[in-house]
Amino acid sequence: MTNTPTLGRRLLAELLGSAFLAALVIGSGIAAQTLSPNDVGLQLFENAAATAAGLFTIILMFGPVSGGHFNPAVSLADASFGGISWRDALAYILAQVAGCVLGAVAANGMFALAAISISTHHRASPAHLFAEAIATAGLLLVIFSLARTRRLSAAPAAVGAYIGAAYFFTSSASFANPAISVGRMFSDTFAGIAPASVPGFVLAQLLGGAGAILVIRVLYPDVTPAQAAEVVVPQYD
């Protein structure tokens, strides 16, 4: 393995990966609404299947450059384990949020909708917020249990499978990602979320992430920062 790519390259990878993530989540939601207008269950299945498969491929595309975070909760957890610096984590988060907003605009455009349409889909019930904490905790447990036991080659498939399953076992449809929560505000479609619901979702996701960090430290304590540095897939120069 050679040196870690420059921060600029890693940020570009996080921006593009996050944009593709938002575009596939929102775009597949719009397509599902169009293809199955009278069947919400089928819409959810189509949205979940596309997201799971797409996330797998996005991690494979951009993971070798940035580690394939595309999620502020993942970046914060990685920084807490010493995998990246806190300065880099903040830069990652800004790139992720910008990417998710860009992806939402792109998804709207691909289906001939207004570039920006603020969602009216309110989601922040107590059950939804609890579900987001659980969903985010589970996602981090999947990622860092593999990272800390040197099974990173399985991570792209495992992350995609987990998110696809979590669409169905959580009442919130498992956003599990503060950046995608922000991005989904900008599309008043099946996958959107009203701005008033976003702060609660983000807080629940961060709390779930903090809980996961504690559990990971207990279950997998004997790991050096160097071992924890590559979260999803190894980085290559």
Image (spheres, grey):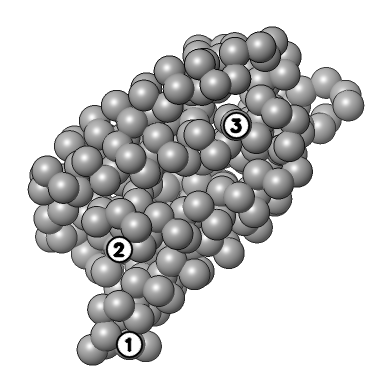
**Mark 1 packing: few (<14 Cα in 10 Å), some, or many (20+)?**
some
**Where is mark 2, residue-wise?**
191
Q: Earlier in the sequence, mark 1 or mark 2?
A: 1
Residue at the extreme front: 219
Q: Earlier in the sequence, mark 3 or mark 1?
A: 1
| Visible residue check, residue 24 | no
Looking at the image, is 114 positioned above or below residue 98?
Answer: below
Foreground pick, 129 / 3: 129
The picture quadrant where one finds residue 30 is bottom left
Q: What residue type is labelled 1?
A: Ser
**Mark 2 packing: few (<14 Cα in 10 Å), some, or many (20+)?**
many
| Visible residue check, residue 80 | yes
Percent x, y of residue 147: 66, 30
Residue at the extreme right: 1
Percent x, y of residue 205: 31, 35
**Where is mark 3, residue-wise?**
145
**Where is mark 1, residue-wise?**
36
Q: Which amino acid does label 2 sit on?
A: Ala
Looking at the image, is 47 positioned above or below residue 174?
Answer: below
Percent x, y of residue 55: 56, 55
- Give the residue at x 40% y 55%: 166
